[in-house]
Amino acid sequence: MSGTLNVTLKIWRQKDASAPGAFKTYEARDVSTEMSFLELLDVVNEDLQKKGEEPVAFDHDCREGICGMCSLVINGRPHGPDNGKTTCQLHMRRYKNGDTITVEPFRAAAFPMVRDLVVDRGALDAVIQAGGYVSVNTGSAPDASAVLVPKHKAEEAMDAAACIGCGACVAACPNASAMLFTSAKVSQLALLPQGDPERERRVLKMLDMHDASGFGNCTNEYECEKVCPKEIKVSHIARLNREFLRAVLCGPEEAKASAG
């Protein structure tokens, strides 16, 4: 049943990476319980603009749980309290009247501050660009049934491909590791025959870029799996490790050399 509530927001404000940051307190009154959390921030920003103050900068795009842009840490947890949901899928009915909600950006060495709640997550793109793709020669598209894929492998590959690259796994990890993200991108291609030609080169290059970007290593803390909005499993990290060993021990020498 819909209703309204009053909440107190403690939001991180920071002009840029070189400026000091601090939490600022804002009161949100008569908030509809049907609002999403991002709509709540919209209302707060409208009030700030009416007062002639700078609105809070935060990332958003599709607001349908697909794009992965809504990167917020809410009361200490990336994307908020609900499992399997992004910030834009979090609704105010999840809170009680009088609650105090702390909102801050994803914090990791590989995610430099931009402004307020916005950080630069381009390091995730760099990992993909290092090898998270399949090279295809130009020409007509092959028939859908030309390459046979066992059903269980196709489903597992699709589960890995569900990763939206939001970076919540990095924000939750005490080591700021992006191993869950990287493993999902490696796993989705390692499971399919289309990924075989670049298999060894892919995992070596992506792991090299992961480390070079400033992400930490995985120490099996499992926070990444807990906060992942697409519920990617850490079993993909195990496959990543196997793919790495396979590439180092059995891969072609040119793949190892190109990985540095």
Image (spheres, rainbow, N blue to C red):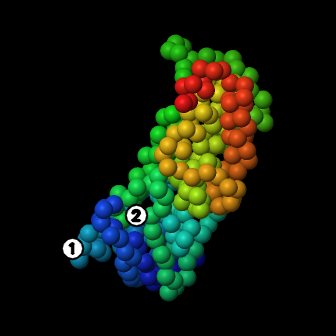
The circle on residue 52 is 1
Disc 1 from disc 2: Cα separation: 20 Å
Find residue 29 and report its horizontal and vertical position in percent: 40, 82
| Quarter-of-image position of residue 161 | top right
Residue at (53% x, 50% y) in the render: 215
Residue at (78% x, 36% y) in the render: 152
Find residue 256 and report its horizontal and vertical position in percent: 61, 26
Location of residue 85 with respect to 199 vertically, above or below: below
Find residue 44 and report its horizontal and vertical position in percent: 36, 73
Location of residue 236 with respect to 49 vertically, above or below: above
260 sits left or right of 122 in the view: right
Report the front residue among 24 and 31. 24
Residue at (78% x, 29% y) in the render: 150
Question: Which residue is label 2 attached to?
Answer: 117
Asked if labels 2 and 1 touch by Cβ distance under 8 angstroms, the answer is: no
Amino acid type at image mark 1: Gly
Amino acid type at image mark 2: Leu
Report the front residue among 173 and 150. 173
Location of residue 47 with respect to 223 vertically, above or below: below
Report the front residue among 219 and 96. 219
**Dot 2: what SS?**
loop
Find residue 217 and report its horizontal and vertical position in percent: 61, 51
- The image quadrant where one finds the N terminus is bottom right
Report the front residue among 148 and 22. 22
